[in-house]
Image (spheres, grey):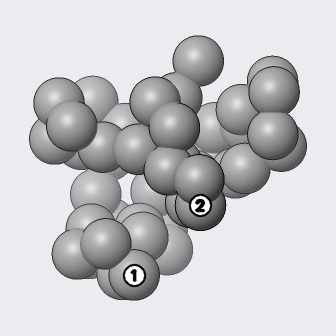
Amino acid sequence: MAKYRCKICGYIYDEDAGDPEVGIPPGTRWEDLPEDFTLPPPRKPMV
């Protein structure tokens, strides 16, 4: 699975890990994230 890095804050979304803190289970592909998915605090939209 893939990893995606925000060019602004450096947050890395790892499809293998998901984002359990906000209810995104491990194995969730980038294209399957909900439309309202945001990055960790301050939880901004991914660019």
Residue 29 point in image, percent of width and height = 32, 46
Disc 2 residue crowd, few under 14, some 14–19, many 20+, Cα 10 Å = few
Residue 6 point in image, percent of width and height = 71, 32
Residue 30 point in image, percent of width and height = 37, 38
Q: Name the residue under label 1.
A: 21
Tell whether label 2 touches label 1 (CB within 8 Å).
no
Residue 37's tag is none
Amino acid residing under circle 1: Glu
**In the image, residue 26 above or below residue 35:** below
Answer with left or right where residue 31 lies relative to residue 21. Answer: left
Which residue is at the front of the view, 42 or 12?
42
Which residue is at the front of the view, 32 or 46?
46
Amino acid residing under circle 2: Pro
Pair 1/2: label in front: 2
Which residue is at the front of the view, 24 or 17?
24
Residue 12 seen in render: yes
Q: Which image quarter: residue 47?
A: top right
Residue 41's tag is 2
Which residue is at the front of the view, 18 or 40?
40
Residue at 70% across, 51% down: 12
Q: Which residue lies furthest to the front in this view?
A: 42
Answer with left or right where residue 25 lies relative to residue 42. Answer: left
Q: Residue furthest bottom?
A: 21
Q: What element carries label 1?
A: helix
Residue at 52% across, 29% down: 46
Disc 1 residue crowd, few under 14, some 14–19, many 20+, Cα 10 Å = few
Answer with left or right where residue 11 lies relative to residue 34. Answer: right
Q: Which image quarter: residue 40?
A: bottom right
Q: How far apart are marks 1 and 2 (CA)?
A: 11 Å
Answer with left or right where residue 9 lies relative to residue 46. Answer: right
